[in-house]
Image (cartoon, grey):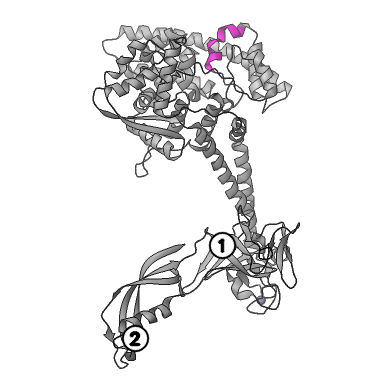
């Protein structure tokens, strides 16, 4: 799920950036540091939408670096167990397949793929129904449901299922 | 529009899902007295005999506290079983409803009830929403089944992998670290062995025994739970399929219902006898069905049984299956005709009983045992009835003799004692008591006697119960 939240971060800025463009430099650095990262608590930071407040800087002894507490608003993406996601398949193997929904990686193990789909090895490994009408391979788009998430301090990994109503391939790259 | 199958659905659902609901908050101690489990079944049953009903009237009918009933109804509303309507009413507004209730009776009398309510008050009305109940119950069953099946099929469990070399375990959440670009398998981080999914036989053997046993036990438990569920909810599921293609009773919203009731009243004043407003305010008439006429709806229990019931059901009412436990539950209609039937060799009764039991028991000798039982039961019942009559007469005399100091304690204790005796004979009394007055108005005398005997009505259920068994 996406959330729009306010976060706070202490930014250390090198003295060479102190000047007319201090604020711009600070924000540019914040974006570079934060966007695309993942925290276990809030999920993936997708984009910073605004700066709420830049606090008073504190000069570090000895180095000349200054620490600014910055409050910023950002969009985060946090996957939850039970959530339905649309994802792009990145890898297919005998054990199942991997897919990505934005920054989130999801693994669907073969016992969570419908029983009528069988693994076909080859150049383009895939899972296919016996009549060949549905095929999951690299770059297929699938709708899946998350059944488990592993949330570490800096990483979120999910496992999903397509063994339920309305889940599975939503766009086949070979026919499109 | 046939109500009966849907009412049966409501009753079954009430017993299946709402039997142990209490309206009390969790913080209150659940002592014996404040424990009102089962009341939701009573309320739902009462609603099956009404259409739109003013909630205060319902509370009065059920001898419940207004607040308690309202809490219950609010719960049912959340459960999507009923629709409610609230409106500010002048005396006139109240009259409209009373008139609707009394619709088929004398039209000029209808003001009576309304006159009491002169102030502008918010009144709440409620009504079963059959269409929604059908969906809700179906959905509930579906969810229960799905949840158990999902668990059973490991649908939402996280796959585990095990290394056959070093027995190190991994879960699907580790998958990203285990893949190698070279082949299609996961590899152990320790020894680079090929991992196997745990559900495979090989892995199951390698895995620790204790863990495996626990899993198997769990599976067994789930399986038996699923089986039990299917078994115990079969009547409900059957009723759902029975109801499936029937038109759903629709009462419309309160205004529409009232309007229709009035229209009906103006149309024909034929069958008004049962819709006396004075009666409805005090007792079971509750909210009669003004525009539906009588609800003598035959339930289509199945084709073969239909044929049978034609022959047998002229004088006997078909017993609802949730009452049938040991084949010995008699509806009050049957009980009302006890004296005749004992003479009649029990033929007609036996056919109904077996008819009802057909779904569960089919063997002939069982039926004959039942017949015997029926006869014996009637004989015993007749005897008991005579005894009771005498007893109550004696009690009355006693009561008259010492009216000066009404020793209510002893007399009511005696009453209760007798009731208990009866309950041993027939276990399902409590299921039936509420309906009793609807059908039988014949034994008016007994009721009067009985009420006299009781020094003061001991309130609620017991009161009704006594009336019921005296009729027997
Ligand atoms: Zn290993």
Q: Where does label 1 land, which residue?
A: A86
Q: CA distance from mark 1 to mark 2?
A: 39 Å
Q: Report whether mark 1 lies on the same chain as mark 2.
A: yes
Q: Residue furthest bottom?
A: A62
The reply to whether the magenta stretch includes residue B54 is no
- Nearest the eye: B446 or A120: A120
- Nearest the eye: B265 or B17: B265
In the drawing, does residue A103 fall left or right of residue B162? Answer: left
Q: Chain of mark 1?
A: A
In the drawing, does residue B56 fall left or right of residue B157? Answer: left
- Mark 2: secondary structure: strand
User: Residue A13 has which mark?
Assistant: 2
The reply to whether the magenta stretch includes residue B341 is yes
Locate residue B215, reporting x and y percent. Answer: 63, 57
In the drawing, does residue A52 fall left or right of residue A46? Answer: left
| Pointer 1 residue Cβ closer than 8 Å to ligand 1 | no
Residue at the image position 74 percent from the left and 59 percent from the top: A132
Q: How busy is the neighbourhood of tag 2: few (under 14 within 10 Å), some, or many (20 plus)?
A: some
Residue at the image position 62 percent from the left and 35 percent from the top: B234
Q: Is residue B372 visible?
A: no
Quadrant of ligand 1 in image: bottom right
- Nearest the eye: B17 or B378: B17
- Mark 1: secondary structure: strand
- Determine the image quadrant of residue B34: top left
Q: Which residues are magenta?
A: B326-342
Figure quadrant of the C terminus of chain A = bottom right
Q: Please tell me whether residue B341 is drawn above or below residue B462 in the rendered image.
A: above
């Amino acid at each position: 799920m996406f959330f729009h939240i306010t976060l706070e971060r202490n930014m250390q800025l090198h003295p060479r950036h102190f000047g007319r463009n201090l604020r711009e430099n600070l924000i540019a650095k914040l974006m570079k540091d934060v966007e695309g990262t993942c925290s276990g608590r809030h999920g993936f930071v997708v984009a910073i939408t605004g700066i709420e407040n830049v606090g008073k800087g504190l000069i570090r002894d000895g180095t000349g670096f200054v620490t600014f507490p910055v409050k910023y608003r950002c969009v985060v993406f946090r996957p939850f167990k039970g959530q339905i996601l649309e994802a792009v398949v990145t890898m297919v193997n005998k054990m199942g397949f991997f897919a990505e929904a934005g920054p989130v990686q999801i693994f669907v193990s073969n016992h969570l793929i419908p029983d009528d789909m069988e693994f076909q090895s080859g150049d383009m490994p895939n899972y296919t129904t016996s009549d060949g009408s549905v095929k999951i391979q690299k770059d297929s788009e699938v709708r899946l449901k998350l059944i488990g998430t592993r949330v570490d301090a800096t990483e979120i990994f999910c496992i999903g299922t397509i063994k339920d109503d309305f889940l599975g391939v939503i766009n086949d790259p070979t026919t499109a | 529009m046939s109500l009966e199958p849907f009412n049966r659905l409501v009753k079954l659902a009430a017993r299946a899902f709402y039997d142990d609901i209490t309206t009390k908050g969790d913080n209150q101690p659940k002592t014996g007295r404040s424990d009102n489990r089962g009341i939701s079944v009573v309320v739902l049953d009462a609603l099956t005999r009404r259409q739109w009903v003013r909630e205060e009237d319902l509370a009065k009918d059920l001898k419940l506290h207004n607040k308690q009933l309202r809490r219950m109804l609010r719960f049912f509303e959340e459960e999507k079983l009923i629709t409610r309507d609230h409106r500010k009413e002048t005396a006139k507004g109240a009259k409209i409803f009373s008139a609707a209730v009394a619709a088929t009776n004398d039209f000029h009398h209808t003001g009576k009830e309304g006159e009491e309510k002169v102030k502008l008050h918010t009144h709440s009305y409620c009504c079963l929403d059959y269409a929604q109940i059908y969906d809700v119950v179906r959905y509930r069953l579906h969810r229960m089944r799905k949840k158990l099946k999902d668990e059973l099929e490991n649908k939402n469990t996280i796959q585990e992998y095990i290394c056959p070399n070093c027995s190190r375990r991994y879960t699907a959440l580790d998958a990203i670290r285990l893949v190698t670009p070279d082949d299609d398998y996961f590899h152990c981080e320790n020894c680079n062995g090929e991992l196997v999914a745990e559900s495979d036989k090989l892995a199951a053997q390698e895995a620790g025994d204790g863990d495996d046993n626990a899993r198997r036990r769990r599976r067994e438990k789930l399986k038996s739970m699923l089986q039990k569920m299917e078994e115990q909810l079969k009547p409900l599921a059957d009723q759902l399929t029975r109801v499936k293609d029937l038109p759903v009773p629709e009462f419309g919203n309160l205004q529409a219902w009232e309007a229709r009731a009035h229209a009906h009243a103006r149309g024909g004043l034929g069958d008004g006898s049962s819709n006396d407003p004075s009666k409805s305010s005090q007792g079971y008439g509750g909210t009669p069905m003004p525009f539906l006429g009588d609800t003598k709806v035959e339930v289509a229990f199945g084709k073969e049984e239909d044929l049978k019931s034609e022959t047998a059901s002229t004088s006997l009412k078909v017993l609802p299956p949730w009452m049938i436990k040991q084949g010995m539950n008699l509806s009050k209609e049957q009980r009302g005709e006890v004296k005749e039937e004992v003479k009649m060799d029990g033929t007609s009764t036996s056919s109904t009983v077996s008819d009802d039991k057909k779904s569960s028991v089919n063997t002939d000798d069982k039926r004959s045992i039942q017949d015997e039982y029926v006869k014996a039961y009637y004989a015993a019942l007749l005897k008991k009835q005579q005894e009771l009559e005498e007893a109550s007469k004696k009690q009355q005399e006693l009561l008259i003799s010492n009216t000066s100091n009404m020793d209510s304690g002893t007399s009511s204790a005696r009453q209760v004692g007798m009731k208990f005796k009866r309950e041993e004979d027939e276990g399902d009394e409590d299921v039936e008591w509420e309906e009793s007055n609807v059908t039988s108005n014949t034994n008016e005398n007994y009721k009067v006697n009985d009420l006299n005997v009781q020094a003061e009505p001991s309130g609620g259920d017991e009161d009704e119960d006594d009336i019921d068994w005296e009729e027997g």
